[in-house]
């Protein structure tokens, strides 16, 4: 039996990849779209002809009673939709980030924990399922790098403000650089390290785009984990227009037995250890499909991504934002 999928929001181009990903599984039917922005509604109507179109997402949930939703609204709206969906027992697959405020994260997690049958929750964090990212996870789990000492994650992006929607240029609505961009890195690093984070220190500021009010274009965070590992993240919108990459994103994972450099933009993984010289590691032949994984979570099966992990990830991100607001004050988790 196919699951009923409602598309809640088409505010970012990521939504079309999500819909295509679910369609490829052959396990869902798109039953409705909810979007209140006139231009986005027009796009949805063109790309999903014949699918009922709603302005109000609550009315959409009431009338179509979906099993699952894809969620690509403005970042600060997602958390409200998650809470309402969880109350109804609806699974949520969201573009990142899912939460930008502590009160909504706490509320959603509380609803989730009180449910006997837990609603599924997953997010579009592509590093876990990428062939090079998955290969690095296998190396770490096999102990080739020893115990992880620290991870450095660099996430620069090109802004091109003239092509951005207003909400994408407003910290209150997009979450700011640490939450919006850094979410990828916190999720992936926590997956590699496998220990609980205990402390966060962060900074955020506006360095280049001074004319855009309410917008910070760069942030830095440091996260300490219970096992002693440390994560350092730099996230910014400072990639020059002349760069050939939208984002020259990369990671350096240092362990007691060696280190790995993950060149995400090139999809390459280089590893050097005390026993072996530098080598380029081939992609993992098999990873996992995030959409099939989400549907497995809906069925209550064991999965690569779990809702409980995403709550932890967003606690770190929101703590980093709080630290930055306080000028780098240490925040305990």
Image: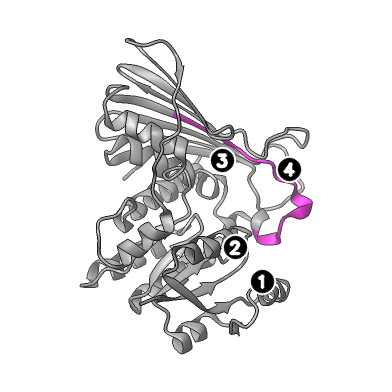
- Find the residue positioned furthest to the left: 116
Identify the residue at horizontal 34%, vertical 65% (top origin): 120
Q: Quadrant of residue 112?
A: bottom left
What's the mark number on residue 16? 2
Residue 79 position by quadrant: bottom left
Q: Is residue 114 visible?
A: yes
Q: Residue at x 27, y 38 (%)?
A: 195
Marks 3 & 2, CB-CB < 8 Å contact: no
Which comes before the other along the chain, label 3 or label 1?
Answer: 1
Identified at 39% across, 76% down, the residue is 67
Residue 157 lies in the magenta-colored region: yes
Q: Position of residue 273 (x, y in %)?
A: 36, 14
Task: Say whether residue 201 is visible.
Answer: no
According to the image, label 3 marks what residue? 204
Q: What's the mark number on residue 209?
A: 4
Check if mark 1's residue and mark 2's residue have beta carbons within 8 Å: yes
What residue do we see at 74% from left, 34% from top?
240
SS for tag 1?
Answer: helix
Q: Earlier in the sequence, mark 3 or mark 4?
A: 3
Question: In x, y percent, where is residue 212?
Answer: 73, 50
* Residue 313 - label: none
């Amino acid at each position: 039996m196919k699951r009923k999928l409602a598309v809640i929001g088409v505010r970012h181009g990521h939504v079309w990849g999500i819909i295509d990903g679910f369609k490829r599984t052959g396990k869902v039917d798109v039953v409705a779209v909810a979007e209140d922005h006139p231009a986005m509604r027009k796009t949805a109507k063109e790309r999903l002809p014949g699918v009922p179109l709603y302005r109000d997402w609550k009315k959409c949930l009431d009338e179509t009673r979906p099993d699952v939703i894809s969620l690509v609204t403005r970042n600060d709206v997602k958390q409200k939709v998650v809470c309402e969906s969880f109350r109804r027992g609806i699974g949520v697959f969201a573009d990142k980030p899912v939460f930008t405020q502590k009160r909504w994260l706490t509320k959603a997690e509380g609803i989730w924990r009180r449910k006997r049958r837990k609603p599924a929750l997953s997010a579009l964090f592509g590093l876990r399922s990428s062939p090079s990212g998955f290969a690095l996870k296998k190396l770490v789990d096999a102990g080739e790098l020893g115990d992880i000492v620290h991870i450095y994650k660099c996430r620069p992006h090109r802004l091109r403000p003239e092509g951005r929607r207003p909400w994408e240029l407003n910290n209150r609505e997009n979450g700011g650089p640490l939450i919006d961009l850094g979410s990828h890195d916190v999720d992936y690093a926590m997956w590699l390290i496998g220990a609980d984070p205990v402390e966060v220190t962060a900074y955020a500021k506006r360095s280049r785009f001074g004319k855009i009010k309410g917008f910070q274009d760069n942030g830095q965070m440091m996260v300490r984990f219970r096992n002693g590992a440390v994560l350092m993240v730099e996230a910014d919108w400072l990639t020059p227009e002349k760069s050939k990459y939208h984002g020259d994103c990369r990671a350096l994972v240092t362990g007691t037995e060696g280190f790995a450099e993950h060149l995400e933009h090139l999809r390459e993984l280089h590893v050097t250890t005390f026993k072996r010289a530098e080598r380029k590691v081939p992609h993992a032949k098999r990873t996992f499909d995030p959409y099939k994984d989400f549907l497995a979570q809906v069925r209550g099966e064991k999965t690569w991504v779990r809702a409980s992990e995403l709550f932890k990830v967003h606690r770190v991100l929101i703590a980093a934002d709080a630290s930055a607001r306080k000028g780098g004050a240490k925040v305990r988790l």
